[in-house]
Amino acid sequence: MTRYPQVAAFSGDENTIRVVGHRGARGILPENSIVGFDFALSIGVDLLEFDVLLSRDDIPVITHNHEFHGSAVRGADGAFLNGEHPRVASLTMAEIERFDIGRLNADTEYGRRFPDQAQMDGVRVPRLGELLQLVSQPRYAAACLMLELKSDPDLAQDSAVRERIVSVICRDVREAKLADRTLLHSFDWALLAECRRQAPDMPLSFLTQLQENEHDVGEDSSILVTPDFSNPDISVPDEVSKAGGSLWCPHFSELGANDLAQARELGLAVAAWTVNEPDDIEAMIDLRVDAIVTDYPGRVQQRLSERGFRWRR
Ligand code: MG
């Protein structure tokens, strides 16, 4: 009994486990890039996860960290940033478009995490509007968006900032007429409460991570803005349900069969992130999650096919 069509698109069934392209297809193409999103969609991965921040001139841009790092970002001179970490919120869109995100820097720990990622030139940080335009093309009519709103830990307490972020992003989604194909997704539950207030037409997807893990190396952590669920008496799916969530997105290492069963009872769809290693993919298939969020969508497709599952109905 799902009210929102996009929640159905993220829900599995006995023959179906969905595949969500994490930042497009980060394992093989530049993350949060139009070329990565287009690739994922073109191989039949209809569900895209990506991260949205605001530029200084209030344009929603698709990028993960609040600062650009030399692990994946080059300046206008073609060199990886070295020693400077420009803040996205301090740059205009015109300034942001001068950076190149087409390559990873193998001299950094983050850069070494994705050794199969293509090396490209001239790849720009996209505006949210560019992705909305891409998925508006008739050939991608099945595409749905897991739009992650990133909150700046320094400003997370500021309700005026929250209001502005949500209003600017939802305006873009509505103008593109994609509200019925978008989930609003975040670690920041206060930001999601603001989404609920401003955008009851879009379902909420709650990310959780109980502890830091090795997957956080080289990027902004979300631990600072997410509620503390370390008390084992707290049921996380229950909290998600009470907060009005449609999806629950736990880190895959923190998801067990009991929580999954409870989430199902509460009517939540469960999407585990970010599942890249073959054994972990198998474990999530064994659990029968609704959706697997991955940097390697082809790898998950292969495992699903081998085991007789589909990722589209
Ligand atoms: Mg994300």
Image: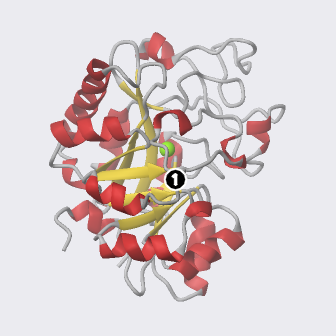
Q: What is the quadrant of the N terminus in the image? A: bottom left
Q: Percent position (x, y) of residue 171?
A: 20, 32
Number of numbered tags placed on the structure image: 1
Quadrant in which residue 313 is drawn: bottom left
Residue at image point 21% right, 43% down: 196
Give the image's coloring scheme.
Answer: secondary structure
Residue at image point 16% right, 65% down: 3
For the residue pair 277 and 298, the one nearer the viewer reads as 277
SS assignment at label 1: loop
Q: Residues within 10 Å of mark 1 (few under 14, many from 20)?
A: few
Q: Percent position (x, y) of residue 302?
A: 61, 76
Q: Percent position (x, y) of residue 251?
A: 55, 57
Give, as a three-letter code, the residue at label 1. Answer: Asn
Residue at image point 42% right, 72% down: 290
Image position of 91 with respect to 300: above or below: above
For the residue pair 93 and 63, the one nearer the viewer reads as 63
Image position of 261 with respect to 171: above or below: below
Q: Percent position (x, y) of residue 212?
A: 65, 45
For the residue pair 151 and 238, the one nearer the viewer reads as 238
Residue 140, can we see it? no
